[in-house]
Structure formats: structure tokens, C-alpha cells
Image (cartoon, grey):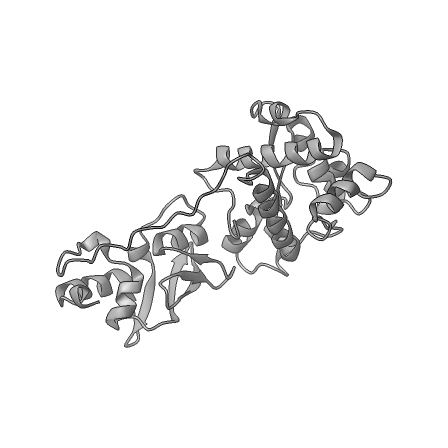
Amino acid sequence: MASFGLRADNRRLVRYLLSRMTAHVQRECEGGNHEYAFLRGGREYEIEHVWANRFERHRAEVKTTAEFYIRRNRLGALLLLPKSVNASFRDDPYERKLEHYYAENRLAASLHPKSRLRNTPFTHYLRDLGLDRAFQPCPEFGVREIERRQNLYRLLCEEIWNPARLGFRMSVIVLPPPAPEQSGSRRHYGVEVVDLIKCGLIAPNAKIFRTVRGEMHFATVEEGGTIRVAATCQAYHSLSAAGAAVAGTRACAGWDVWRIERDGAALPLKRLREEAISRGLMSKA
């Protein structure tokens, strides 16, 4: 949830989460059952980007178009609004949008500085659930506010899908220890970045880079094998996930696109993977 956002392949999931969160806050403040109203299809409600698709407005905070789209598509930078309302102010600056948000559902209206004025049901909800600090109004909406709303949405999801609240009795699950890996059984597709670190072919915290439409993007290979993108400080579990994030695509061949400097040359990481396999280092990792 720390970095979850809208991608090319998960629009329905994002819309579902926004629908459930919007309905939940509305119900807690006003009573009633609002799920159906928000879930009944894209003809009625649609995803609203708080940041308009104008990179030039945010150059002071985001340096590249790739970082702009990552921030703009974060879950915390999205709302659910009636389609007719959303279409009327899609490219307006945030200051103008904020007045429209104030007239909509409670989750959208919470961005407005006046959202708590003479609003007893809302303030009681914040007090009872301990969400007063998380539901801060946002007179401006930059990177800091996106991260704050991202955390708010995480808390709302934890509340909505709280197992105890849903009547589940949680038991302790003890996982069996992993089976020992047989020597020489690792296949080409089983090699992970962390294996290359263990083999000594990549140093912990080594810098890697790739190019997207003429822009250079950098990342750090952390000791546990995660890939942390420099522009957003977000960590990804694989080269492919990190590569897709900076390119704004559904997927990518991570081992092919990420490179590391070796003796003054840019070496694709797949070369290091091939070297580890050919030298038999994987069986020793």
C-alpha cells in the first residue's frame, strides 16, 4: 500500500478500492448503505486524478515526466466522483477543483479546509476511529499531501477489511521451514538479484540505471535484493517491477533494460546473470 497506484492493468481494482472507501466514510458519517451507488459501474462514477495531466505545474517537486505519472497515479492522489461532475473540471488547477470536491462525497470533501466546520457527524467519526490526524485537509496538494492521503487510504482499508470487524477468528499460522535447495538445481529463470549479491557480482547498494524516452533513471540495488528507484524512493521486489514503474508500462524485461557500470561500460544485468550461471556460482550462493 505504500506505493500502490493506478496502472494499465488494474483500473477495475483501483476503482473497487475507491468505491469501498468512499462508501465506508459516507456510511460512517451519514448512515445508510452506499456501496451499491458507488460500485454500479463506470457510467455513473469514475476515477478522478487530483493532479491534472499537466507536468509543467509540478516541476518544482517532480523532475521527470516518469516521476510525475507515478505520483499522479498513486492511490492517495485519486478520488471517485460522478462522471458528469468529473468531466466539467478535469484540467482545472487544484485550487478550483477543491471547491467542487467540497460539494461531493465525504472522502473527497475532506480535502477542503472547511470540511470540519459545522460537520458534527464527520468530526465524531474522526474522533471515534482515531483518524483525526490522518484526515488532514489539504489547501495545497503536492507530493507530501499525496503521501499523507496514501497513508489515510491504507488506514481506511485496514478498517474496512479488519478481520475482527468482519467476524473472523484469526488463528496463528506456523509455516514449515523451506526445503533445502538441491545443488545445481537452479534454472536460468530462478536467478534473483539477491543471488548476484551473494555471489559477489553486485555489491550491496550498487547503482543501476536505464533510459526511457531519452531520460536516464537511476536505482539502488539494496542488500536484500530490492530495487529502490531514486526519483521516488520507492522499493520494488524485482527489476521488472521497477523498470515498469519508471517507464509507466504494464511490464518490462527488467534484466535487459537495467544496466550497471563495469570498467567504463554500461553492462546489462542479464550479462551478470549469465556469468553467474556459466561459472557455476549459483550452486554456491
Horizontal and vertical percent for residue 31? Answer: 72, 28
In this picture, is 97 found above or below 133?
above
> Percent x, y for residue 14?
52, 37
Is residue 88 visible from the viewing direction of this image? no
Residue placed at 26% from the left, 73% from the top?
200
Farthest residue, direction right: 118
Q: 239 or 130, which lies in front?
A: 130
Label tally: 0
Residue 132 x %, y %: 73, 50
In the rendered image, is residue 186 in sight?
yes
Image location (x, y in percent) of residue 138: 73, 50
Q: In this view, does 251 lie above or below 90?
A: below
**Residue at x 82% of width, y 44% of height:** 114
Residue 203 picture quarter = bottom left
Q: Which residue is drawn at 62% across and 51% down?
A: 146
- Location of the C terminus by quadrant is bottom left
- Would residue 83 appear left or right of 202 to someone viewing this image? right
Q: In which quarter of the image is residue 78?
A: top right
Is residue 216 or residue 161 the one in the foreground? 161
Q: On screen, 257 above or below 85?
A: below
Q: Is residue 238 left or right of residue 22?
A: left
Instruction: Name the foreground residue: 156 vs 7.
Output: 156
